[in-house]
Amino acid sequence: RLLLCSDAKFTGLKEIVDRDTPDLLLAARISSVRVEDLVVTLFERPGHAGESWRLGVGEYDWRARPPIASLRVPSGLRVRLRAGDAELVAALDAARVDFPAPSAVLVERYCVGLYEFPDYQGRCQWFGIGRHDMDEIALGNDVAASIHVPEGLEVSLFEDAAFAGARVQLRADTPELDIGASSIIIAPVRRRR
């Protein structure tokens, strides 16, 4: 995965590239590039200690492996630990995982896609969990016209920079937006108990 930045020292407008991209948003303005390893790290002991395993996107048979006691999950990925009918889903780091020995581990992409045109057309920029202000939206201010939101994420789109102005909250794909995006907050949906 590449993090492209318009300014030196990884600042300014940012674009994440993690697949073949024929039309870069920042093509003429790239001043710094960071190569990021998009993998989750599983640990045999709590507190991110002991033996570890680094896994990219995919499904892994874990039946003959040691238990998983903690994990690190970068923005843009999520992990599903499965044991029979039970499942634990994690999209953030966990210093302690209380789950029976999983039989399978699934690592999947977990990010929001903001599209230039309605119906998921045109250029697309991907965002992981977190706060993304106008300086990170390489599509441009108020350009986004549709959005892909995976199950389990909630997106707050703000009309103005610095998370101000009118706000729309979304928990599903939206083929045509009624608001431009100048800043965005992406978070896991909080489950009510």
Image: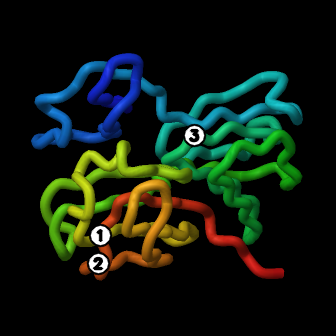
| Image coloring type | rainbow
Q: Is residue 133 above or below residue 45?
A: below
* Badge 1 element: loop
Of badges 1 and 3, nearer the viewer stands 1
- Pointer 2 local density, CA inside 10 Å: few below 14, some 14–19, many at least 20: some
**Left or right position of 145 against 112:** left
Q: Residue at x 73, y 76 (%)?
A: 191
Q: What is the count of numbered marks?
A: 3
Earlier residue among tags 1 and 3: 3
Three-letter amino acid code at disc 2?
Leu
Q: Is residue 10 above or below residue 64?
A: above
Q: Residue at x 11, y 41 (%)?
A: 22
Q: Which mark is residue 159?
A: none
* Badge 3 element: loop
Q: Residue at x 73, y 39 (%)?
A: 71
Q: CA distance from mark 1 to mark 3?
A: 27 Å
**Residue identified by numbered label 3:** 74
**Residue identified by numbered label 2:** 177
**Residue 115: x, y in percent?**
24, 62
**Residue 140: x, y in percent?**
23, 52
* Badge 2 element: loop
Three-letter amino acid code at disc 3?
Pro
Cβ atoms under marks 1 and 3 closer than 8 Å: no
Q: Which mark is residue 180?
A: 1
Question: Which residue is at the front of the view, 74 or 50?
Answer: 74
Of badges 2 and 3, nearer the viewer stands 2
Image quarter (top left, top right, bottom left or bottom right) of the C terminus: bottom right
Cβ atoms under marks 2 and 1 closer than 8 Å: yes
Q: CA distance from mark 2 to mark 3?
A: 28 Å
Q: Is residue 61 above or below residue 191?
A: above
Question: Which residue is at the front of the view, 40 or 182?
Answer: 182
